[in-house]
Image: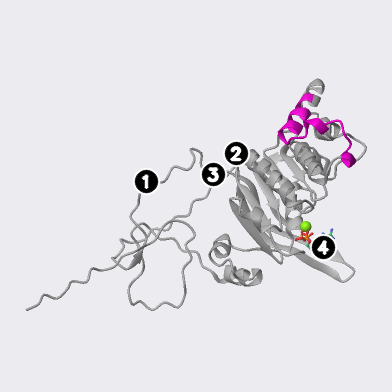
Amino acid sequence: MIRRIEKRRARHTKQHPHPPSGTVRTPPKTAPRHVSDAAPEAIIEMRGVVKRFSNAAGEFTVLKGVDLMINRGEFVSIVGKSGSGKSTLLNMITGIDHPSEGQVIVNHNDIYTGVTESARSKWRGKNLGIVFQFFQLLPMLTLLENVMLPMDYVDMYDFDERPQRAMELLKLVGLEKFANKLPVLVSTGQQQLAAIARAMACDPPLLIADEPTGNLDTRSADTIIQIFEHFVAQGKTIVMVTHDPSLTSRTQRNIIISDGELIDETVSRCLPQLRHRHMLEFTKIAQRRTFQPRETILSQNERVDHFFMIRKGEVEVVLKKVRKARKP
Ligand SMILES: Nc1ncnc2c1ncn2[C@@H]1O[C@H](COP(=O)(O)OP(=O)(O)OP(=O)(O)O)[C@@H](O)[C@H]1O
Ligand SMILES: [Mg+2]
């Protein structure tokens, strides 16, 4: 059985003495902007995940200690060079493969500790929708039957209810007219739409997509992203690997993986022109600091041998008024 674990929150706040006046500082504390009534809740937590593979040349490490937190309701893209470990990372979240070290918690479930493969497979059917680059529809089943398949597998919904639910999902992706066709008789874009309908068959809270538009034309890709946006607006969480920059710009968070390590998101946002390996170097040397409201960050004429990237919050520059000397 998959063990349900309780959510733990740790808050680290650093106390600072009363701030002196200065030239660059944080603004006074204001009422927090209303974003959502609910505090963010992690739906995916990866802690120190390492994945090693072995081949004829020996053992090599593909994921080198990944820590990642994705909140419920986020639309996240993951990018990185070919071979950087994107699919391996997704496979750790879906339970398709297992980590060599570390812990993966999805929807409050520790999916590897003391869990059998078959329990994980049932859990996956109820909790995750998965979309691959090459659709992976069963060729001898109609689109409708393909969409019904996950409901049959995890025995969700009444038997009589399943065709109607599958039809509603096909309607949602604009395929109701093709419901009784075999995959080979529809376009590749339509096959991917059917695969998305199948992924959502059991109404999972989380959709994982590995290059879902990698094999499609721009228009079909756009339709798929619109459907993803619709699911996110309904509160679903989507994690999508993509190579397409026009798609990453439509997600709320963009995570870059470089040679099996995650790049700090502040570094990639502030220094987008850098090569991934240089971003990774910055990630390793950057230090995180927290400033209280009105605290001075830098004073005029102060010597600095480093620079700041703002991760969260606002900074203001305070200039002293220069009084004009009165004419005698
Ligand atoms: N089952 C496996 N056995 C051995 N090596 C593997 C296995 N799966 C992946 N690898 C290796 O791990 C590395 C990362 O592979 P992965 O598929 O995660 O990369 P990727 O970032 O998804 O690349 P792409 O953009 O080409 O899909 C590659 O060197 C790959 O050859
Ligand atoms: Mg891949």
Residue under label 1: 31
For disc 4, does the CB lie below 8 Å from ligand 1?
yes
**Looking at the rendered structure, which numbered label has been put on residue 53?**
4
Q: Label 4 vs label 2: CA separation?
A: 38 Å
**Looking at the rendered structure, which numbered label has been put on residue 154?**
none
Quadrant in which residue 243 is drawn: bottom right
Q: Label 3 vs label 4: CA separation?
A: 34 Å
Q: Amino acid at mark 4?
A: Phe
Q: Label 1 vs label 3: CA separation?
A: 18 Å
Residue under label 2: 233
Quadrant location of ligand 1?
bottom right
- SS assignment for the magenta stretch, majority: helix
| Residue 164 to residue 298: above or below | above
* Residue range (magenta): 164-185
Q: Residue at x 69, y 47 (%)?
A: 222
Disc nearer the start of the sequence (2/1) = 1
Q: Amino acid at mark 3?
A: Pro
Furthest-right residue in view? 140
Local packing at callout 1 (Cα closer than 10 Å; few below 14, some 14-19, many 20+) is few
x and y percentages locating residue 306 in the rendered image: 47, 75
**Looking at the rendered structure, which numbered label has been put on residue 40?**
3
